[in-house]
Image: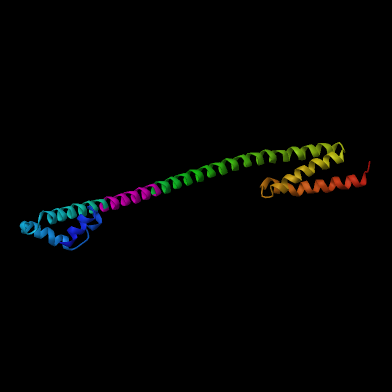
Amino acid sequence: MGAVSDYRSKQSDKEFLWTADPRLEQARALMQQEPLLLNEAERSFTETSIREKSRRVRRTRLIVAGVILGLAGLAGAAWWQRGEAQRQTQVAQKNLADFVRADSIRVAEEAAKERLNYNRYVEGGDTYARSKDWDLALGLYRKADSLYLRFPTDPALIRNSGPLREKIEQIKKEIINNPK
């Protein structure tokens, strides 16, 4: 075997072993069936080649297993992050819905309070109109009318808007007919 002398001359450099050479299996079979056909250097070379090939196969398997485990870990982390993102999205959507609901309630409560002012403005305007204080009456009637403009779908305000507009027109005529 010329490979043995190459291996020995290169001071046992593993690059000269038969780790990928198909003749290694033939040498192994020969060594098992007819061990006396190979001298000590050839047997040592064949055994070293077999051990080195096994070591490389184990190393390759470990590398492949490590890569697979690493990829599985990355996939698991990505799956966990996806689940966490979905959970956070659900929490954010719930928080938004809660905020919108609370804000709607707050707006509705404020609107209800402002609608209550409608009657107060009309009654105040009526009081000033009876005392012939046309400017103050007109100011309060206009405040009541501004609530109608702000809440145009409110049934009570719609029902009262016609009579209120008549009162406003009547006060305007009184101001024109009775200047100060």
Which residue is farthest right?
180
Image coloring type: rainbow
Where residue 132 sits: x, y (%)? 87, 38
**Residue 168 appears in the figure:** yes
In the rendered image, which quarter is residue 118 located in?
top right
Would residue 101 be found to the left or right of residue 169 on screen? left
What residue appears at the point 15 percent right and 56 percent down from the top-left corner?
46
**How many numbered marks, from 0 up?**
0
Q: Quadrant of the C terminus?
A: top right
Where residue 153 sits: x, y (%)? 66, 50
What residue appears at the point 83 percent right and 40 percent down from the top-left corner?
137
Which residue is farthest bottom?
22
Whether residue 167 is in magenta: the answer is no
Q: In front here: 163 or 19?
A: 19
Where residue 80 sits: x, y (%)? 39, 46
**Residue 18 appears in the figure:** no
Question: Magenta region, mostly helix, strand or loop?
Answer: helix
In the rendered image, which quarter is residue 50 located in?
bottom left
Where residue 56 sits: x, y (%)? 24, 53
Whether residue 70 is in magenta: the answer is yes
Would residue 73 be found to the left or right of residue 102 on screen? left
Would residue 150 be found to the left or right of residue 97 on screen? right
Q: In front here: 146 or 29?
A: 29
Q: Which residues are magenta?
A: 60-78
Q: Quadrant of the N terminus?
A: bottom left
What residue appears at the point 60 percent right and 41 percent down from the top-left corner?
103
In the rendered image, which quarter is residue 129 located in?
top right
Q: In front here: 80 or 10?
A: 10
